[in-house]
Amino acid sequence: MATTILTPAENRFLQLSQRALALPGLTRLMPLLRDHPTIKDSSDFLPRSAREALLEQRVDWLVQSSEAWKLLADSPYVINPSNNRLDWRHCALCHKPVRYEYHVVLRKDGHKIIVGSECVKKFMSDEMQYLMTITTEDNIHAVAQYDDLTAHYPQVPEILWDPEALPNLPQTHQRRQHWVRHGTKDTVTGYLKRPQTTLPETQLKPYLTEYDVLTGIDQEAATATQQAAKRRAEREKQLAEEEAQAAWQHAEHQESTAVQELRASAPYRSYLRQVADLITRHLPLTAFKEKVAALTMPASLKKLVNSYQLGVMATEFARTGQIQAARLQIVPRYLVADLNRASRQRANQRQRDWWDDLFNAAIGFDLTPAERTASLAKLQHSWEGQQVPASVYRDCETLRDQLTAGEALPATWPAELRQAFTQRLAVQPANDWVPAKKNHVTTTQLRGLVHENTEFDQIKRAYHRLYALPDGAEAATLSALQQVALRRADAREKRESVTQSLVRKLLDE
């Protein structure tokens, strides 16, 4: 027997509420809901994705819709004076004639509808049903009084109707929360049951004061919970690193001479770097396997690992940020440890490079608005760029001007991104903007420096503007750049042979 997923009244309620809800899933289903008042699980017009969305989210959508409406303050409840049903107006949800009309309005845009009492009870929030009862039985002005009360004391609806209020409050304080809720409700109910213009400030004060205290306790408990979770995560991460290190050391101790030679070989290290680079790009599994297959695998590895096993490790890294390959018992542990270490190092380097590039596109480089927008759009396409909200890129288009004007970084940014920018801002000169310096450089990038500049002093300044390598690497890099500049100068002056002859004489012992 077919099961009804959405009745006509529920359908109509979702359609009327949708304009006030930021629910992309519901918005996508609107054409389907408009064309089909009743939706059953066996309906042939119902795509599987729509069926799953309705089954999974229907209740949540109806609850959020119920909170989008309120009773109309100036005319919440009207009784039709006619005894003839033909003169009665129809409920906007069930379409039945109703003599007892409840006028409700969409909070967002003021759209008004008429709803019968049964549909109010079925579809509307606990808050509206509470006000409906008082309005009908005691005081027609209760809604207007309630609006005035909540405008002065906005925490009252949270106390009365939010079951998730103070979610972190310790058990020992929950009796105080119950006292606040019951006392507030009794006070508000007494205030609403008869027309009056004076707010019950004196009666509410003890409960609202206590609620402020409980809110502070809840926030402290939430902070303590977050800190404890952070400590647990850090400890788990530390333990995982220690286990990985222990596994690597054990493998190091057990490996044979042949394995030592393999791990020390340039082809093995090069292959690891290439695979780690593919893993940290978070490619779809099919694309990852295709690119891995195109790499040149050392012959001694072909009997140890295949594309399926590498795909499993890439999937694990995408999910957890590390590779343990517990399911792959036949893969050598040293290979797993090496690939895990290489992938994590590469991922950290990619993340740092991306932060540098985002900082430079937003602040470090002197770009036109069009160049800055293009640079930011390019950064957004990478995996790292997809991990931050799209609003970050819009903020970055004007961030340099805002910081120059003395404004702070946007508070809505993810904490890691704010920390990365803060670190880079801390080393900026007082009266200028300079690029964030990368901690590594490629041969291609060095060639660019040499081609863009003629003299070594120019090359050196350009290098120091963009890069800051460890001391040893920096000394070797600058020495190489200087030698290239000297050779280019010799070539321009056509004195290479004379220079080389003199160098040989000077080095001849």
Image (tube, helix red, strand yellow):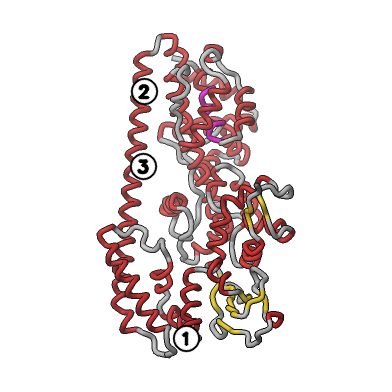
**Callout 3 secondary element:** helix
Residue 30 coordinates in the image, percent (x, y): 68, 59
For marks 1 and 3, the one nearer the N-term is 1
**Callout 2 secondary element:** helix
What is the quadrant of residue 102 in the picture? Answer: bottom right
Magenta span contains residue 277: yes
How far apart are labels 2 and 1 at the CA level?
75 Å
Q: Is 433 positioned to the left or the right of 223 in the image?
A: right
Instruction: Please give the residue where the numbered disc 2 appears in the rendered image.
Output: 247
**Callout 1 secondary element:** loop
Quarter of the figure with the C terminus: top left
**Amino acid type, callout 1:** Asn
> Residue 325 — which label?
none
Magenta span contains residue 463: no
The reply to whether dot 1 and dot 3 touch (C-beta < 8 Å) is no
Please report the bounds of the magenta region as a residue range.
271-281
The reply to whether dot 3 and dot 2 touch (C-beta < 8 Å) is no
The reply to whether dot 2 and dot 1 touch (C-beta < 8 Å) is no
In this view, which residue lies farthest toward the front?
A: 83
Vertical arrangement, residue 343 with respect to residue 206, above or below: above
For marks 3 and 2, the one nearer the N-term is 3
Q: Tell me which residue sits at (40%, 74%) in the image.
A: 156
> Residue 139 — which label?
1
Q: Tell me which residue sits at (56%, 61%) in the image.
A: 62
How far apart are labels 3 and 2 at the CA level?
21 Å
What is the quadrant of residue 110 in the picture? Answer: bottom right
Instruction: Please give the residue where the numbered disc 3 appears in the rendered image.
Output: 233
